[in-house]
Image (cartoon, rainbow, N blue to C red):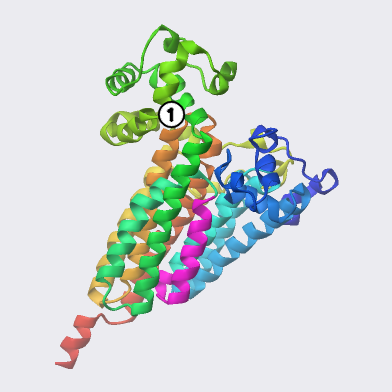
């Protein structure tokens, strides 16, 4: 922590970025409303980070110390969980070292010195992974409660978290609660209740976003920077209601902040604004499914910059001067297409081997399901986050990248641990045959 905060103590870590200091729409302004005013829950920002700021009276120095402490605690939770879930001490120790290496990278740790939501999103993401990984190893009612508590807190920090968690986690958890006859009834009930709360939180997020129009800026970015310059996307969105006229064509290549378009009342764009606040966002969600192959090509183009995760532009406190940018040989997570392919291939092979071992031993399936679901959630989140806003990609994707790095380590370490365990302990079939 001391190494990260460094020389910033004397400057008190002032908030400098527009997302924090906008007079009416910034995090500090929304936090100033406080949770006892109804407008706080339908403001321009999701409530998670403004509530965190409010708890510390919007004091930048105290907030930075608190979020850095939370970051360290989340990493410590990951490390301790590795020693609880993994049977091999060597594998657990190596996994813990990998977690520390990931956390020490400037591209992740740097956000703790900024008054932006990325820090809380990364820390709660780590904590949620630790909680559910521990639950997967030993399913208990209290473990499920901790898992849901942290996951729902994580959902409320950024709108981009809501859709992936709802469409990936909720169906899987409800299926487990329904079919998991070996679980204690209290555990199954807690899983089901948590899934319902996530759905309620998602509904609230949708209503809050619609009421505050906080997604308008991102949608204007998508239309101006990604849709209009691309003939295939332009044709598809036009066929799905986008009022393409001479006025809208002038927005080609321009984001929503250019010319203050996101607050413009120009009557020439009246039809477009009506569509953008109605059917437009729904058309975008549909397009991410039906045009997935086309989007995949565009994402592949952006992938090197996303994986590299160079966010030093936001580093006003010199964290990049004190912490490593990357861990050598991509051991701290993928930083290139080749590294991403290698890590993901290793994770898939690891899931398969862990599944085979679990089926032979008739136990240990929980961590396999956790790894598969968590990895799927993170990849889906990465895709929808990328699809939802083409501006500041490195910043918006940094949380996804941090969780992806941690989960890849967990999945591969779990598979190595499962194989080691299988060689030491006879599987169920072998034991039965020997007894016969």
Q: Residue at x 51, y 70 (%)?
A: 81
Q: Which residues are magenta?
A: 135-156
Horizontal side, residue 132 vs residue 212: left or right: left
Residue 164 is a magenta residue: no
Residue 154 is a magenta residue: yes
Give neighbour class at mark 1: few <14, some 14-19, many 20+ (Cα, 10 Å).
Answer: some
Residue 350 locus on image (x, y percent): 33, 59
Name the quadrant of the C terminus.
bottom left
- Magenta span dominant secondary structure: helix
Q: Is residue 256 visible?
A: yes
> Toward the viewer: 352 or 120?
120
Residue occupying the far top of the picture: 246
Q: Residue at x 59, y 48 (%)?
A: 38
Q: How many marks?
A: 1
Residue wearing tag 1: 277
Residue occupying the far left of the picture: 436
Residue 279 locus on image (x, y percent): 35, 29
> Toward the viewer: 276 or 119?
276
Q: Residue at x 74, y 48 (%)?
A: 58
Residue 15 locus on image (x, y percent): 73, 39
Q: Residue at x 83, y 43 (%)?
A: 11
Horizontal side, residue 232 vs residue 38: left or right: left
Q: Is residue 87 visible?
A: no
Residue occupying the far bottom of the picture: 435
> Toward the viewer: 308 or 183?
183
Q: Image quadrant of residue 14? A: top right
């Amino acid at each position: 922590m001391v190494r990260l905060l460094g020389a910033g103590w004397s400057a008190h870590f002032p908030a400098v970025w527009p997302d924090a200091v906008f007079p009416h729409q910034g995090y500090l302004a929304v936090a100033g409303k406080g949770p006892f005013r109804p407008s706080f829950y339908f403001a321009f920002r999701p409530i998670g980070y403004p509530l965190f700021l409010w708890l510390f009276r919007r004091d930048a120095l105290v907030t930075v110390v608190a979020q850095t402490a939370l970051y360290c605690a989340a990493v410590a939770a990951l490390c301790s969980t590795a020693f609880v879930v993994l049977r091999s001490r060597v594998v657990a120790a190596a996994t813990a070292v990998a977690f520390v290496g990931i956390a020490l990278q400037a591209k992740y740790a740097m956000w703790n010195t900024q008054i932006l939501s990325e820090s809380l999103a990364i820390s709660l993401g780590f904590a949620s992974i630790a909680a559910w990984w521990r639950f997967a190893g030993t399913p208990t009612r209290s473990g499920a409660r901790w898992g849901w508590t942290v996951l729902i807190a994580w959902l409320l920090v950024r709108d981009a978290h809501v859709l992936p968690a709802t469409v990936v986690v909720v169906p899987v958890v409800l299926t487990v609660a329904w079919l998991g006859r070996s679980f204690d009834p209290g555990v199954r009930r807690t899983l089901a209740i948590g899934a319902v709360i996530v759905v309620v939180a998602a509904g609230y997020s949708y209503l809050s976003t619609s009421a505050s129009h906080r997604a308008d800026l991102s949608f204007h970015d998508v239309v101006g920077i990604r849709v209009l310059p691309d003939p295939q996307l332009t044709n598809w969105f036009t066929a799905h209601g986008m009022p393409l006229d001479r006025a809208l064509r002038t927005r080609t290549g321009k984001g929503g902040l250019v010319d203050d378009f996101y607050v413009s009342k120009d009557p020439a764009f009246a039809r477009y604004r009506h569509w953008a606040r109605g059917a437009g966002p729904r058309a975008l969600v549909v397009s991410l499914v039906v045009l997935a192959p086309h989007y995949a090509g565009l994402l592949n183009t952006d992938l090197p910059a996303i994986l590299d995760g160079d966010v030093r532009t936001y580093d006003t406190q010199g964290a990049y001067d004190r912490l490593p940018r990357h861990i050598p040989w991509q051991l701290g997570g993928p930083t290139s297409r080749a590294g991403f392919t290698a890590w993901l291939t290793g994770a898939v092979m690891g899931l398969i081997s862990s599944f085979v071992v679990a089926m032979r031993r008739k136990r240990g399936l929980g961590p396999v399901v956790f790894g598969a679901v968590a990895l799927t959630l993170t990849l889906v989140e990465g895709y929808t986050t990328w699809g939802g806003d083409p501006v500041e990609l490195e910043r918006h994707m940094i949380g996804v990248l941090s969780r992806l790095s941690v989960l890849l380590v967990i999945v591969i370490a779990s598979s190595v641990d499962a194989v080691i365990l299988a060689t030491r302990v006879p599987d169920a079939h072998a034991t039965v045959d020997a007894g016969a």
